[in-house]
Image (spheres, rainbow, N blue to C red):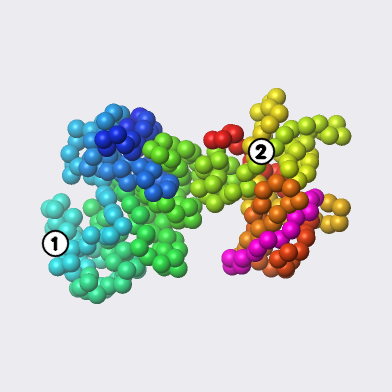
Amino acid sequence: MLTVKHISKSFGDTAALHDLTLSVEAGEIVAILGPSGCGKSTLLQVIAGLLTPDQGDIRWEDNSQLQVPTHRRAFGLMFQDYALFPHRNVFENIAFGLQMMGLSRPEIQRRVSELLQQVGLPGLETRDVNTLSGGEQQRVALARALAPKPRLLMLDEPLGSLDRTLRDRLLVEMRAVLQREGLTVLYVTHDQQEAFAIADRIVVLRAGHVAQIGTPQQIYQQPASEFVARFLGMNNILIGQLETCNSELCLQLPFGSFPIGESLALTSGVEEVCVLLPPASAELAGEGEGFVATVTSHAFRGSVSEVSVQPASGLPLQFEFGSNLAVPPIGSQIRLKLKMDMIVGLPDGA
């Protein structure tokens, strides 16, 4: 439905977007994920027509939108601050776009009532928006964005001002609403967990470039570069050597040698590799197994315990274990073995 082709946009000497290409299918929720300043909001504004790209094209159903005015693109855009009309009540806020479309009063009433039911605010038509909680204002803003049935809905950090508990709950509800409406959605966020929870696919941006595109599972389990891995909070990135031991290929790391088998996809003929050890890629080992490390810190995170360890040689590592595991005290030595099928080969220095 939407195709962004080789878009570049600069502000003076600063390149916000550089030769960026991506596509979005009908009914798909795509999250644009990346750190502050990577070009996420600029991309939305270019697609919406609020900014003109320096080069490239924005196409909808293979028709260029560059010469189509913003108000005729039928794209909806919702910002973090919601921008509700303070002098209008809930009904009037949601009905605004429908009135601009020239719908009849009964049609408007039916659509507003339907949307309030969907976002969990039935019967609040006459409420003053200034008396609503942050979560309620977010729902009203979403209903207003949905009301005209935009062919593309773009959400720019829509939950950024809410606390984590409310954000997590609204994410589930928002995804359900968007799917029921059958909308094609671009969802901008810098929060990895938010993107994983709501998106069908994720586009990771780095300094105006596409760093990786994939499903949430692909992005998390197979990050395409050191940048993506570190952005997702994975810091166990090591340089290792490939060698033959006992007639099989092994990965030599600073703290030990580990048989690879067929678990680690690596370029044939390479002798030195950059690898990621994901947080869940280690488990406690028995006597004589794995490698020895000293526990340097641990933190309870609800479903998991985060444990930092220092191997006998090399950099410190961080792993996650089930929270039901009794974590040895700080300063104690433990034996760990790696789950080789979870280790990811990365382009060196990417």
**Which residue is depicted at the point 44% across and 61% down?**
172
List x then y, in percent, for residue 283: 73, 55
User: Which residue position holds label 2?
Assistant: 239
- The residue at 56%/35% (across/down) is 349
Residue type for callout 2:
Ile
Among the 4 quarters of the image, the one containing residue 106: bottom left
Q: Residue at position x 75%, y 38% from top? A: 252
Whether residue 329 is visible: yes
In the rendering, at what x and y percent does residue 241 appear? 72, 34
**Camera-nearest residue between 206 and 168:** 206
> Start and end of the magenta stretch?
290-302
Q: Report the mark closest to the observer, 1 or 2.
A: 2
Task: Tell me the residue that label 1 is attached to.
Answer: 105
Judge whether residue 71 is colored magenta: no
Q: Which mark is residue 22?
A: none
Report, in whole angstroms, how far the alpha carbon at label 1 lies from the one at label 2.
Answer: 66 Å
Q: Amino acid at mark 1?
A: Arg
Image quarter hosting the C terminus: top right
Q: Position of residue 17 (x, y in %)?
A: 34, 36
Q: Identify the image quadrant of residue 121.
A: bottom left
Q: Position of residue 134 (x, y in %)?
A: 32, 69
Report the label total.
2
| Residue 336 visible in the current orientation | no
> Closest to the observer: 62 or 132?
132
